[in-house]
Amino acid sequence: MKPKSTLFRAAEHAASYLDGLSTHPVGATTTADDLRQRLALALPETGTDPARVIDDLVEQTRGGHLGSAGGRFFAWVIGGALPSALAADWLTSTWDNNAALYACGPAAAVVEEVAGSWVKQLLGLPMNASFAFTTGCQMAHVTCLAAARHSILRDVGWDVEADGLQGAPSIRVIASEHCHGSIERAVRFLGLGKNSIVALATGADARVRPDTLEASLAQGEPTLVVLDAADLNVGAIDPFDELIPIAKAHGAWVHIDGAFGLWARASKHAPRLAGVELADSWATDAHKWLNTPKDNGIAIIRDSSAHRAAMSVSAAYLSSPSGVRDQIDWTPDWTRRARGFAVYAAIRELGRDGIADLVERCCRFAEELANGFASIPGVELVAAPTLNQALVRFIHPDPCASVNEQDGWNDKIIDALNREGTAFFSGSRWSGLRVMRISVVNWQTTSDDVVKTLEAAERVIETERGNAIVPRPA
Ligand SMILES: *Cc1c(COP(=O)(O)O)cnc(C)c1O
């Protein structure tokens, strides 16, 4: 069997899946038990024709894929894939080079050089900063914070790469109370421990305040400061132009979690991130707002020598010609996917204008969705979008409902919306209350998607409220 027919089958399945996104339910329509029943064959003792394997896989998983690739998926922060980025990703698997060294994938190495430079230009970050394409923002944090750990300890005379952390001076990590869970995990991976994190209380706007940061820094230990661009609940962007100079005056390393929000730098919203370029490291994702397929994070580090010291490897059999970039010296991976192709394709497909338009469109749709929800009876706007994220809350029809009942009601409505199938949302907690998040981060979303989503939401909420049994007052 030639590979070609299997690949053509896969392309047909892919095209029909993508075509179906606008008409099929956005949520999954099957259960874990059902999927297990279909997938958990006895360990195959003999082989199967490859095209058959692919046809079966499509059937066995039918209904088990969330429609996050489509335009009416508003849960968490999960981007879609631009056509050229998706196709480049297929080709990446086809070429199947190991993008660890220039020598084992020359085109993969050079495309990363170019894509890295383009990303720095788009985000307005220092052009001499080093960068790495990682699995996601999680590992971009690990990469950036490993460089930070190197630099902070080097400054107090400690070589962490040689001597590790046993007996090392301690490092404090100051982060917003709203910082993403991936920061805590990066800090754990790096041996600093989550108890080294000092969570800074924020103002009502969910942003770190200069006086709070100043007071925390005054304690004088070697410090790493993590700021948000933007937080995942309300899209809060810390006031970098005020905060970063304060942190720098105390000798801290400043790291930015910009998983999705850093892309606002490539749009008319850029002034809101003024000063972000003053930081020491930035972590973001191509697979969120740039809309490449998953497995594409980006670490950018001002001090390239700290970056290299934290990540590089030397082994006798690793030798590339001089003047080329070996990715292995900048990433935590050894054998790795050639992530630059998808990033390169996405940036070419959209161009600077198209990226600005994608970001601005998503923000506008988030606002339309938030306002639309807020105009439905029984819905309250908790946080209007300042970027592409908003929060709404569903009000229990019984005015005497307890906080628990209120929270349960929110879960019930989110579940009902998702089961109805037009769109898909996820919940969160904000100021101690259960809420629903609205996140728009996919190139596919159109005004029509917004309208359809709101029509469906109005129907679902009205039905649920009608069905709710509210005890009559005695
Ligand atoms: C998604 C997200 C992360 C984690 O990124 P991954 O690419 O999933 O590893 C970190 N921070 C924020 C604010 C996020 O939205």
Image: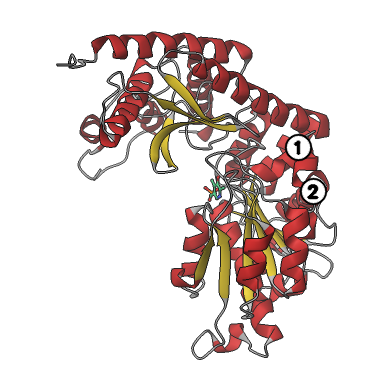
Tag 2–tag 1 contact (CB < 8 Å):
no
Viewer can see residue 52: yes
User: Which type of secondary structure does the marked residue at label 1 adopt?
Assistant: helix
Q: CA distance from mark 2 to mark 1?
A: 23 Å
Task: Determine crowd level at label 1: few under 14, some 14-19, many 20+ residues with C-alpha closer than 10 A.
Answer: many
Q: Which residue is mark 1?
A: 347
Q: Nearer the viewer, residue 45 or 93?
A: 93
Q: Is residue 137 left or right of residue 347?
A: left
User: Which type of secondary structure does the marked residue at label 2 adopt?
Assistant: loop
Q: Is residue 126 left or right of residue 155?
A: right
Q: Is residue 93 left or right of residue 51?
A: right
The residue at the point 75 percent across, 32 percent down is 355
User: Residue 344 in the image: x percent, y percent?
Assistant: 74, 41
The residue at the point 66 percent across, 46 percent down is 237
Pointer 2 or 1: first along the chain = 2
**Residue 398 occupies which quadrant of the picture?**
top left
User: Residue 374 in the image: x percent, y percent?
Assistant: 51, 19
Q: Which residue is mark 2?
A: 274
Disc 2 residue type (three-letter) = Ala
Q: Can you tell me whether the CB of the residue at mark 1 lies under 8 Å from the nearest atom of ligand 1?
A: no
Task: Determine crowd level at label 2: few under 14, some 14-19, many 20+ residues with C-alpha closer than 10 A.
Answer: some
User: Residue 258 in the image: x percent, y percent?
Assistant: 65, 49
